[in-house]
Image (cartoon, rainbow, N blue to C red):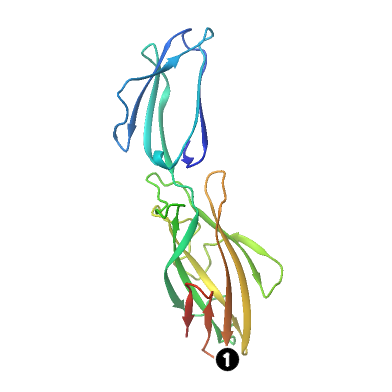
Amino acid sequence: MDFVSGDGVQLAITGAAAYGTVTLVETKNGSPYCPCPWTAGTTDGSGNFALTGTETDIHVAEYTEQWYVNGVAIGSLLDFEVVYKPDYIVPTSVNYTALGPRCPVSWTWGIEIDITYQIKNSSGQNVTTQTGIPFEPTELVSFDGGSLVGGDVGPVTGYSTSSKYATDGGVFHDVPVGACWNQGFHSTIDQTLYIEIGNATPQVRRQFFDVYSNGANHGSISNGVDVVKTR
């Protein structure tokens, strides 16, 4: 029942009173939204009525709607939210994390980091939800030009900040990001990130990391733009 900005919406009433007056009582973020009841039209000779439209950024909010025909409530109370469509993500913090479970004990060359991202819409506003709509970060990753592997960004065993979904505030952690080895190395990582929300999975970021290490317990990682970390 929830919507992402840009989604089409269709309301259908069937089998109500013929040529009845269709009205709506609606709230937006808990307050009356329209001069209610608002008259939407009339049913046809079979008691049917249809209304179509598109949700946009100006509709982002939480709503309740109760529809009526000739003053008789039709169906149950509708309760839904419209959220911004994710367009891109920005790192809000980059923290070093100890080499984790995927690195054997003897592999002490390299670096792994925890990147915190904020999901944004095309106008730069934070993508948030009041009702817990799931924002699921996913990724496609290639190491050193090899095959693409993909899936959910989290959760990842051994990293307490990772999770399957972003917070209601549109924040999530991508961890671990980096590489480790049992000797000095230079690796490249090609990463594309998406946010799965409803029926949509918009791409929100693509970046290329260089990861270096020239000694045990040392490493550096950079995407050349806004993620740089060295240990």
Query: Which image quarter: residue 117?
Result: bottom left
Crowdedness near tag 1: few (<14), some (14–19) or many (≥20) residues, C-alpha within 10 Å: some
**x, y percentage for residue 219?**
53, 85
In the displayed structure, would residue 18 be above or below residue 23? Answer: above
Residue 156: x %, y % from top left: 53, 66
Q: Look at 35% across and 28% down and name the residue there.
A: 26
Residue situated in front as seen by the camera: 198 or 210:
210
Q: Going 52% across and 83% down the picture, which residue do you hit?
A: 220
Q: Is residue 107 above or below residue 112?
A: below
Q: Position of residue 208 (x, y in %)?
A: 59, 71
Residue at the disc numbered 1: 214
Q: Amino acid at mark 1?
A: Asn
Query: Outermost residue, bottom direction?
Result: 215
Say whether residue 169 is visible: yes
Residue sticking out furthest to the left: 31
Number of marks drawn: 1
Residue 103: image quadrant is bottom right
Is any atom of residue 105 visible in this view?
no
Q: Residue at x 53, y 44 (%)?
A: 198
Q: Which residue shows up at 52% across the image and 48% down it? A: 197
The answer to whether residue 136 is left or right of residue 118 is: right
Q: Name the outermost residue toward the front.
A: 123
Image position of 111 with respect to 157: above or below: below
Q: Residue 95, image x and y in percent? A: 43, 75
Label 1's element?
loop
